[in-house]
Image: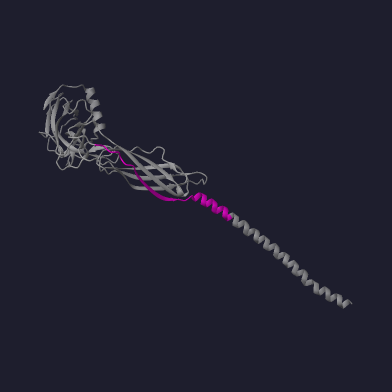
């Protein structure tokens, strides 16, 4: 552990904003036994310049199972008082919003976060100074090959306005690729489609497509999705023009999306098709692996599902037209039947009068 020179307050503010945006760390309720600070504390962290790299935005390594390396974290205290920070590793995960975050402080890590070891759990940083804190990354012998994510975290208890102690955390991301066979794969789950039509029978409606993308492989993947909806027999296909982008996914993580596809004609069936493609994300790694890892392409994953897309407004209009036609035909038939009845009655009346006239003629003769 070594002291570093003071940096400016402006740099501190920029560094803090960068770390919060890039590190995905949030304030968590803490259960540490350390006395909380009574006033807000301003500090920052960044990767140290070591043999693993310099001026790095985060940590990125490549190690074989059983491999190990040494690195360091810079903790800068921009406060006017000496502060003591906890330092540790924490597993990373993808939030519902698709952002990388770290496990709460009270939740133990089981992967990369647990492979990060500091010589001491705490570091004391004098006011206005920076301290370089060494740590080791030790990969287990039996670990599965692939990509892992974690954070190198510094935290301090701060007493809030309500008197409740809050564990404030700052950290820097860490990515690790463990050597071995890489098998990138994406899967689509929960694909569903529903059709929404309007009252205008001569205008198309829209379809809502729900789906979940899962990184079913062992590498980091930047996925992309193409969503389309077609009618019966694949007629009138329409593609989603501006679907929400998918975030980078860690192995085993998922993200759900809902896409609205406009301009879909109600052709009695709406068939949604989702096609996923992706690119394996490879960071600039400090390579400690014995051999280079071959990175295969991500195979395309597709899925289809269908739902009813009945043009109810057109059906109603057609029913009205058929009703008018039937009503017109019935009226015409009734009118024709009435006229025929009058003709028949007149004929019958005429035929009934003919015998009387004949009898009168015979009497006269």
Whether residue 211 is visible here, answered yes or no, is yes
Which residue occupies 36% across, 42% down?
275
Picture quadrant where residue 118 is located? top left
Q: Is 23 drawn above or below residue 348 in the view shown?
A: above
Which residue occupies 65% across, 60% down?
333
Judged left or right of residue 11, residue 190 is: right
Assign the C terminus to one quadrant of the image: bottom right
Judged left or right of residue 264, residue 110 is: left
Q: Is residue 83 or residue 174 the one in the foreground?
A: 174
Give the x, y percent position of residue 227: 39, 42
Q: Is residue 118 or residue 337 the one in the foreground?
A: 118
Judged left or right of residue 240, residue 178 is: left
Q: Is 345 drawn above or below residue 169 in the view shown?
A: below
Residue 28 counted in the magenta span:
no
Give the x, y percent position of residue 252: 25, 43
Picture quadrant where residue 116 is located? top left
Give the x, y percent position of residue 67: 14, 36
Q: How is the image coloured?
A: one colour
Q: Which residues are magenta?
A: 294-323
Picture quadrant where residue 12 is located? top left
Give the x, y percent position of residue 157: 16, 34
Q: Residue furthest right?
A: 365
Whether residue 159 is visible here, answered yes or no, is no
């Amino acid at each position: 552990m070594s002291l570093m020179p003071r940096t400016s307050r402006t740099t501190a503010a920029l560094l803090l904003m960068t770390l919060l945006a890039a590190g995905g760390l949030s304030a968590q309720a803490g259960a540490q036994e350390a006395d909380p600070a009574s006033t807000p504390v301003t500090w920052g962290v960044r990767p140290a310049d070591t043999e693993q790299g310099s001026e790095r935005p985060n940590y990125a390594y490549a190690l074989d199972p059983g491999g190990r390396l040494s690195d360091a974290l810079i903790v800068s205290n921009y406060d006017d008082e000496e502060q003591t920070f906890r330092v540790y590793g924490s597993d990373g995960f993808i939030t519902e919003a698709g952002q990388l975050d770290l496990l709460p402080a009270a939740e133990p890590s089981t992967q990369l976060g647990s492979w990060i070891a500091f010589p001491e759990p705490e570091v004391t940083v004098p006011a206005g100074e920076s301290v370089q804190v060494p740590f080791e990354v030790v990969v287990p012998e039996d670990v599965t090959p692939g990509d892992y994510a974690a954070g190198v975290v510094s935290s301090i208890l701060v007493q809030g306005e309500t008197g409740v102690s809050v564990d404030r955390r700052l950290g820097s991301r860490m990515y690790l690729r463990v050597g071995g066979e890489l098998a990138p794969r994406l899967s689509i789950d929960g694909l569903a489609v529903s059709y929404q039509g309007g009252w205008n029978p001569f205008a198309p409606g829209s379809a809502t497509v729900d789906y979940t993308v899962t990184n079913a492989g062992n590498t980091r993947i930047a996925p992309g999705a193409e969503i389309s909806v077609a009618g019966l027999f694949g007629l009138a296909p329409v593609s989603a023009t501006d679907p929400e982008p998918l975030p980078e996914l860690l192995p085993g993580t998922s993200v759900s999306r809902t896409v609205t596809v406009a301009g879909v004609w109600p052709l009695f069936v709406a068939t949604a098709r989702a096609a996923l493609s992706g690119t394996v994300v490879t960071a600039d790694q400090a390579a400690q692996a014995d051999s280079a890892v071959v990175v295969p392409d991500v195979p395309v994953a597709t899925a289809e599902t269908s739902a009813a897309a009945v043009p109810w407004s057109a059906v109603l209009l057609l029913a009205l037209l058929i009703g008018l036609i039937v009503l017109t035909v019935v009226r015409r038939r009734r009118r024709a039947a009435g006229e025929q009845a009058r003709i028949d009655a007149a004929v019958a009346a005429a035929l009934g009068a003919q015998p009387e006239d004949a009898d009168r003629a015979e009497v006269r003769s």
